[in-house]
Image (spheres, rainbow, N blue to C red):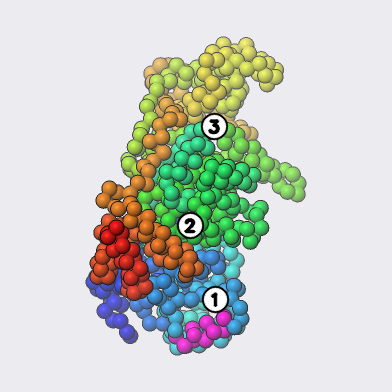
């Protein structure tokens, strides 16, 4: 067996290999343990958040073990992206998929059988084709030339996951065809049900299971009030931070509108949604990935397959449907580990829209409402709304959702950095709760909207026909707007000072805490709504640290873009922003100094030292 030292993974040899092949100075959390288990030939399941650095966990072992590592990947775009990155690091990698003409596919297959690749990416359909199984896989397996089989995006194997792919189910049959070959599964999906399903469906043998924290410390989270000013804020975000951004909207129409508006205001923005034809989608996505467009305005159709590591901000212009969805979508920011911002715009109108959409969930054949689905969707909506309205650490709420205990404060969200003032709302709370009490005396129960109508003295048919204008609480809350009342009501719910129960639909009921408030034994505080003006709460600006030479950074960015366009690859394939920033800080003027920059491995040194050092020298002499 070759490379014995590395295989046993002495500290130095592993770190040397990390720097030599990938240019990285150190492992990200969890990577080293996974790499060591992979080198030891164990089956494993690794669960790490997006941007956690899963690829490296199988790529480094692939280089250090004899034979080829097969990587199953669900999307052509993902394979191409990974292979581009590997090739630029001088690593023998390739892919086989339907985008290749037959001659090219044959040539790659022949090279594979000659042992010329360390990594082969392919779709499950291709791997399971009888032709491939018999004339490629079988001889490789017989010669013990398959180092490992990697299942990337392994949640595709589970129908509980969001991207179920039936072909993934067949992968377990590889166990018999390649006995003794370790199988490594990777996913960012957090739910325990999907995790268990992966182990079972892939028949992993006594796997080591790694579950990394889902905390992404480099992301700043904020929620902003939604209103007429929101567009101006979005525009300012795009202008202040020249880095790439994604804006998520609920509808195609909204995507088109917003993309057009941003363009009119001088931002290079493009739309992306399922209503565009495949070619337009491909062209727009490619322009975004190559930094030809700065902003992608999209529905959630834009997602998987986007490995762009240097997205600097993700704005949700409409309320996401689930907290998990929000975590995954906002998580497309900052995969490279650099600081990035995630901003959610939230207004009460979003709740009404979402409610309306939930009511549309009906059986397409019978037209009957799908009650169970509606119930689940409402519950998910409530979680998103309480995230948006909470004054608690945003990170703590998100991580709790994934079953992780994060005490907070995180000091990287609006609530931690700029706590909202608390206002005493005891009187309003008592008014609201007594309205519920009065109705309860009449054996009636209502939801928030109707209660507010009573308090504000509405003269609607719904009120008059039920004789609610005769209640003593009728009209006592006129001086507050509907929005103010809603905020108070929802805060009472979050604080457990009133309960929500299902009675066909959601209605409110008093609990023991409510009575404590009504009897005046307990005061009620509600977080003030955030002012539209305190832009500080929208997060730190991505200003470069003071010792980075900003002008040089821009020069290097332009050089990177030129080299990338010539090579037909996205700029991040050449260097991450973090590497450029280090160059602009240290200003390496020799090849030796350049080699020490993070992100510069063997291959990149050979390929890029000359043009970059020349640009740096040129800058120093002007
Ligand atoms: P995942 O598949 O978990 O979402 P990737 O494997 O695509 O994440 O890695 C995300 C980014 O992190 C990539 O741009 C990669 O180059 C970078 N990265 C991975 N490991 C390290 C490391 N040890 N040091 C620095 N950057 C890393
Ligand atoms: Mg990945």
What distance separates the C-alpha of mark 2 from that of mark 1?
Answer: 27 Å
- Pointer 2: what residue? 291
What distance separates the C-alpha of mark 2 from that of mark 3?
Answer: 29 Å
Badge number at residue 233: none
Residue 358, image quadrant:
top right
- Mark closest to the chain's N terminus, 1 or 3: 1
- Pointer 3: what residue? 228
Residue 448 is left or right of residue 527, and the answer is right
Mark 1 or 3: the one toward you:
3
Q: Are marks 2 and 3 in contact (CB under 8 Å)?
A: no
Quadrant of the drawing holding the N terminus: bottom left
Badge number at residue 96: 1
Find out whether residue 360 is within the magenta segment.
Answer: no
- Eyeballing the image, is 440 above or below 158? above
- Residue 528 rendering spot, x and y as whole percentages: 42, 26
At 41% from the left and 63% from the top, the residue drawn is 560
**Magenta-colored span:** 104-115
Mark 2 or 1: the one toward you:
2
Residue sticking out furthest to the right: 366
Q: Residues within 10 Å of mark 1 (few under 14, many from 20)?
A: many
What distance separates the C-alpha of mark 1 from that of mark 3?
Answer: 50 Å
Q: Is residue 260 visible?
A: yes
At 58% from the left and 13% from the top, the residue drawn is 474
SS assignment at label 1:
strand
- Residue 608 rendering spot, x and y as whole percentages: 36, 70
- Eyeballing the image, is 55 above or below 303? below
Q: Residues within 10 Å of mark 2 (few under 14, many from 20)?
A: some
- Mark closest to the chain's N terminus, 2 or 3: 3
Q: CB at mark 1 closer than 8 A to ligand 2?
A: no
- Eyeballing the image, is 394 above or below 8? above
At 41% from the left and 38% from the top, the residue drawn is 538
């Amino acid at each position: 067996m070759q490379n014995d030292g590395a295989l046993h993974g002495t500290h130095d040899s592993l770190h040397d290999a990390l720097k030599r092949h990938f240019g990285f100075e150190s492992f990200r959390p969890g990577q080293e343990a996974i790499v060591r288990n992979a080198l030891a030939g164990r089956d494993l399941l690794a669960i790490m958040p997006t941007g956690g650095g899963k690829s490296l966990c199988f790529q480094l072992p692939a280089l250090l073990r004899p034979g080829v590592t097969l990587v199953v990947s669900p999307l052509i775009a993902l394979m191409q992206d990974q292979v581009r990155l590997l090739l630029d690091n001088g690593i023998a990698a390739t892919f086989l998929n339907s985008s290749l003409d037959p001659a090219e596919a044959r040539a790659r297959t022949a090279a594979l059988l000659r042992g010329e690749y360390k990594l082969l990416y392919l779709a499950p359909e291709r791997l399971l084709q009888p032709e491939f199984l018999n004339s490629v896989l079988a001889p490789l397996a017989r010669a013990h030339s398959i180092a490992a089989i990697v299942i990337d995006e392994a949640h595709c194997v589970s129908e509980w996951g969001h991207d179920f792919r039936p072909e993934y189910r067949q992968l377990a049959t590889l166990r018999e065809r390649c006995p003794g070959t370790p199988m490594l599964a990777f996913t960012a999906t957090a739910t325990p049900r999907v995790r268990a399903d992966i182990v079972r469906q892939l028949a992993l043998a006594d796997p080591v299971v790694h579950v990394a924290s889902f905390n992404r410390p480099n992301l700043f989270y904020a929620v902003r009030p939604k209103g007429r000013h929101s567009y101006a804020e979005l525009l300012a975000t795009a202008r202040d931070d020249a880095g790439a951004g994604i804006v998520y909207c609920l509808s195609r129409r909204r995507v088109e509108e917003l993309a057009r508006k941003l363009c009119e205001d001088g931002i290079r923005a493009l739309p992306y949604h399922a209503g565009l034809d495949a070619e337009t989608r491909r062209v727009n996505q490619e322009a975004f990935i190559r930094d030809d467009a700065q902003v992608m305005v999209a529905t959630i159709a834009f997602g998987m397959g986007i490995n762009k590591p240097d997205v600097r901000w993700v704005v949700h212009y409409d309320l996401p449907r689930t907290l998990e969805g929000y975590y995954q979508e906002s998580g497309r920011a900052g995969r490279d580990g650099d600081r990035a911002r995630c901003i959610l715009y939230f207004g009460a109108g979003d709740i009404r829209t979402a409610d309306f959409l939930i009511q549309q969930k009906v059986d397409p054949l019978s037209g009957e409402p799908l009650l169970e689905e509606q119930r689940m969707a409402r519950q998910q909506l409530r979680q998103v709304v309480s995230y948006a309205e909470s004054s608690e650490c945003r990170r703590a709420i998100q991580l709790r959702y994934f079953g992780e205990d994060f005490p907070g404060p995180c000091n990287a969200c609006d609530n931690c950095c700029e706590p909202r003032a608390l206002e005493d709302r005891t009187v309003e709370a008592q008014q609201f709760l007594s309205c519920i009490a009065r109705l309860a005396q009449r054996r009636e129960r209502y939801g928030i909207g109707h209660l507010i109508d009573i308090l504000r003295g509405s003269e609607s048919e719904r009120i008059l026909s039920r004789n609610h204008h005769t209640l003593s609480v009728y009209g006592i809350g006129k001086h507050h707007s509907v929005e103010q009342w809603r905020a108070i009501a929802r805060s009472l719910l979050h604080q457990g000072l009133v309960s929500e129960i299902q009675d066909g639909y959601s209605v409110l009921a008093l609990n023991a805490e409510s009575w404590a408030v009504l009897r005046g034994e307990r005061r009620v505080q509600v977080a003030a709504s955030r002012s539209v003006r305190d832009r500080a709460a929208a997060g730190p600006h991505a200003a470069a640290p003071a010792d980075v030479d900003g002008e040089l950074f821009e020069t290097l960015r332009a050089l990177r873009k030129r080299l990338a366009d010539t090579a037909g690859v996205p700029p991040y394939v050449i260097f991450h922003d973090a590497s450029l920033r280090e160059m602009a800080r240290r200003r390496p003027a020799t090849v030796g100094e350049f080699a020490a920059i993070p992100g510069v491995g063997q291959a990149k040194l050979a390929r890029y030292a000359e043009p970059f050092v020349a640009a740096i020298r040129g800058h120093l002499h002007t």
